[in-house]
Image: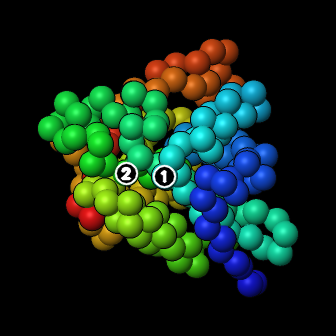
Amino acid sequence: MTLSVKVLRPDALHAALSDLAALRISVFQDWPYLYDGDAGYEERYLERFAEAPGAILVTTWDGDHMVGAATGAPLGEHDAAFAEPIAAAGFDPARVFYCAESVLLKPYRGQGMGHRFFDLREAHARALGFEFSAFCAVIRQSDHPARPQSYRALDSFWRERGYAALDGAIAKYDWRDVGAPRETTKRMQVWIRSL
């Protein structure tokens, strides 16, 4: 299987947004996000992302089919829900680049794409002069009924990349879980590293 990687900056992002939306909905419906995707929400969210100065979209392609993507932008260009806990922990949000999502279809995992996603976003953040890189990971109960027995947390992968969970920095964000009647607030742990 031969995969290609393309890095898209704001001027080229719009053409890839529908593929990215479909990919996000597909991947995030699985554990641990359990996101019941909404095309309208995706369109609004991704349009805002695409307009962010300094945004980057790293895409992975199998032929002409997008199979993976990772986004990033200056923290100040994201929802305040992510910036607030980072600021409360003593970091200036203007110095932080936010790695929003990394999504990859299951058949393409385990080939080093996760590292590639972080490498390219972190290099972009350094080139823009940011001092820190951060992201958020949803917190789920270990005994949650939807948790697959085979699930392996990514904490060790993130630590190997130099990230650490930022003590007490918990973002809160709402979405509807698969099968749920309405949105509920999720807690998300902030992870951060120096660049």
CB of mark 1 within 8 Å of CB of mark 2? yes
Residue name at image x 33 percent, y 40 percent: 189
Task: State the quadrant of the C terminus.
Answer: bottom left
- Disc 1 marks a residue whose amino acid type is Gly
Residue visible at 63% across and 62% down in the picture: 8
* Residue 62 relative to residue 137: left or right: right
Q: Determine the CA span between mark 1 and mark 2.
A: 9 Å
Labelled disc at residue 108? none
Q: Going by the image, does 193 lie left or right of 32?
A: left
Residue 118 appears in the rendering? no
The residue located at (74%, 84%) in the rendering is: 2
Q: Mark 1 = which residue?
A: 54
Quick one: quadrant of the N terminus? bottom right
Q: Nearer the viewer, mark 1 or mark 2?
A: 1
Q: Position of residue 113 (x, y in %)?
A: 56, 72
Against 145, is 179 above or below?
above
Residue type at tag 2: Phe
* Residue lying farthest to the bottom in this orientation: 2
Q: x and y percent of residue 175 in the render?
A: 57, 26
Secondary structure, mark 2, is: strand
Residue bearing the label numbered 2: 97
Q: Nearer the viewer, residue 64 or 52?
A: 52
Q: Is residue 92 above or below residue 118?
A: above
